Image: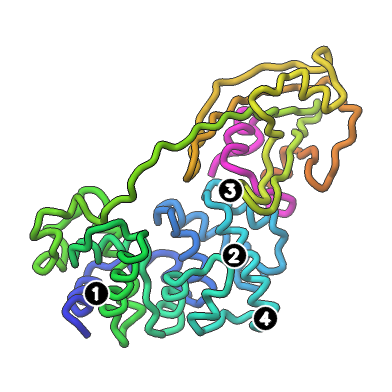
């Protein structure tokens, strides 16, 4: 065991976090769910989602048997919804191809949707007592600073260098504790901003600290201006409180989630009403303030238009891709549907859902 791993384990024994929900009743399924949820998401946010998700789906079989709408409903507000879709798909594959048991080999784990090299390493290290190697965002930050690695970690050459460092430091014994420890170090001391270097167990050999480069590493990705898109969302409700919702295609943006109907920004209210077989006298209408929702690659300016319908539209609604949804169906887990973050915000003024 090298100096880095030994020193880190000493620190973890006294200072590491050992009471997070996924650190109890450890098994491959719980570790897998937590690792997927923690991608791009802070621990404080994940705790409640993890508790609800594992209470409803305590094992791989229960997740595999669930309807995707219920899975995405429990994911509502957590973002990056492809993670939830991939969890569901992978659970079905594990049941079908591995008798419901997570595979133990790195390659087999990586073959499952949503499980990459680092996530597979975490599952093997924490839940299977194997020498799995991880390189998530926290670990990249720790290693980039400790070794003084300059260059964006997403570049292939820099990534390859960092995987070599990560592998070299990962011990053959106490791998689970080491894996938890290095993630903890990045999450609690070697943070992106205002790193607590004076408390860090690695400070005596940290290259970035010696060169006063902690604030510069890891090297960020060159920023590009995000394009701006606009869209109108029509929130149409019946006298009984039901709201018209449309399901997105299974793949792509908001894949499988439900939104109020989205149309181009040049779609007038009359044009949309014509889709429903209605005219202006059949509705009470009002608009709300435009708000911006930011995705990884672009901004979306959302223009809400609220329509209270005085009568049932004459045009039929196709149940496969759109439906009238009663308020209780938005909250009842047995009938719930997955909502995008934009849908949650659009429906909240109607008192039909609350953002988690």
Whether label 1 touches label 2, CB < 8 Å? no
Residue at the spot of label 4? 97
Q: Are marks 4 and 3 in contact (CB under 8 Å)?
A: no
Of 272 and 190, the residue lying toward us: 272
Mark 1 vs mark 2: which is more N-terminal?
A: 1
> Which numbered disc covers residue 13?
1
Q: Are marks 1 and 3 in contact (CB under 8 Å)?
A: no
Counting from the top left corner in percent of width and height, residue 202 is at: 15, 68
**In the image shown, does 114 or 289 lie closer to the viewer?**
114
**At numbered mark 1, what does the secondary structure look like: helix, strand or loop?**
helix
Residue to which mark 3 is pinned = 76
Looking at the rendering, which quadrant does residue 313 occupy? top right
Of circles 1 and 3, the one toward us is: 3
Q: How many marks?
A: 4
* Mark nearer the N terminus (4 vs 3): 3
Q: CA distance from mark 4 to mark 2?
A: 15 Å
Identify the residue at horizontal 23%, vertical 78% (top origin): 5
The residue shown at (15%, 59%) is 208
Q: Is residue 232 above or below residue 100?
A: above
Q: CA distance from mark 4 to mark 3?
A: 29 Å
- Give neighbour class at mark 1: few <14, some 14-19, many 20+ (Cα, 10 Å): few
Please say which color scheme the image uses.
rainbow
On screen, 134 above or below 238? below
Q: Are marks 2 and 3 in contact (CB under 8 Å)?
A: no
Tag 2 secondary structure = helix
Q: Secondary structure at mark 4?
A: helix
Residue count near mark 4 (Cα–Cα under 10 Å), binned few <14, some 14–19, many ≥20: few
Span colored in magenta: 332-356
| Mark 2 crowd level (few <14, some 14–19, many ≥20, 10 Å Cα) | many
Instruction: State left or right for residue 205 relative to residue 352.
Output: left
Judge from the rendering whether residue 120 lies leftward or rightward of residue 87; answer left or right. left
Q: CA distance from mark 2 to mark 3?
A: 14 Å
């Amino acid at each position: 065991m090298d100096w880095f791993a030994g020193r880190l384990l000493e620190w973890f024994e006294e200072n590491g976090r050992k009471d997070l929900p996924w650190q109890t009743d450890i098994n491959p399924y719980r570790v897998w769910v937590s690792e997927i949820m923690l991608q791009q998401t802070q621990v404080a946010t994940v705790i409640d989602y993890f508790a609800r998700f594992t209470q409803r789906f305590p094992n791989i079989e229960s997740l595999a048997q669930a309807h995707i709408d219920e899975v995405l409903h429990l994911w509502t507000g957590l973002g990056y919804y492809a993670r939830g879709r991939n969890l569901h798909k992978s659970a079905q594959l594990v049941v079908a191809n591995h008798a419901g048991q997570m595979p133990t080999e790195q390659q087999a784990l990586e073959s499952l949707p949503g499980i990459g090299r680092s996530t597979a390493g975490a599952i093997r290290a924490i839940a299977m007592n194997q020498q799995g190697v991880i390189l998530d965002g926290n670990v990249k930050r720790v290693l980039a600073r400790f070794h003084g690695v300059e260059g964006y970690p997403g570049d292939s050459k820099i990534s390859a260098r960092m995987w070599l460092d990560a592998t070299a430091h990962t011990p053959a014994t106490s791998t689970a504790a080491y894996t938890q420890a290095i993630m903890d170090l990045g999450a609690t001391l070697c943070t992106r901003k205002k790193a607590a270097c004076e408390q860090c167990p690695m400070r005596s050999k940290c290259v970035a600290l010696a060169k006063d480069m902690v604030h510069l590493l890891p090297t960020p990705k060159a920023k590009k201006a995000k394009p701006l898109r606009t869209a109108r969302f029509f929130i149409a409700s019946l006298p009984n409180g039901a709201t018209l919702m449309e399901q997105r295609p299974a793949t792509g943006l908001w894949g499988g989630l439900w939104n109020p109907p989205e149309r181009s920004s040049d779609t007038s209210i009359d044009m949309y009403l014509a889709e429903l077989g209605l005219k202006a006298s059949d509705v009470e209408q009002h608009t709300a303030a435009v708000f911006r929702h930011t995705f990884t690659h672009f901004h979306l300016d959302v223009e809400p238009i609220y329509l209270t319908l005085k009568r049932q539209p004459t045009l039929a609604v196709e149940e496969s891709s759109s439906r009238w949804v009663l308020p209780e169906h938005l909250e009842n887990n047995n009938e719930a549907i997955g909502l995008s973050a934009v849908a949650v915000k659009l429906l909240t003024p109607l008192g039909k859902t609350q953002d988690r």
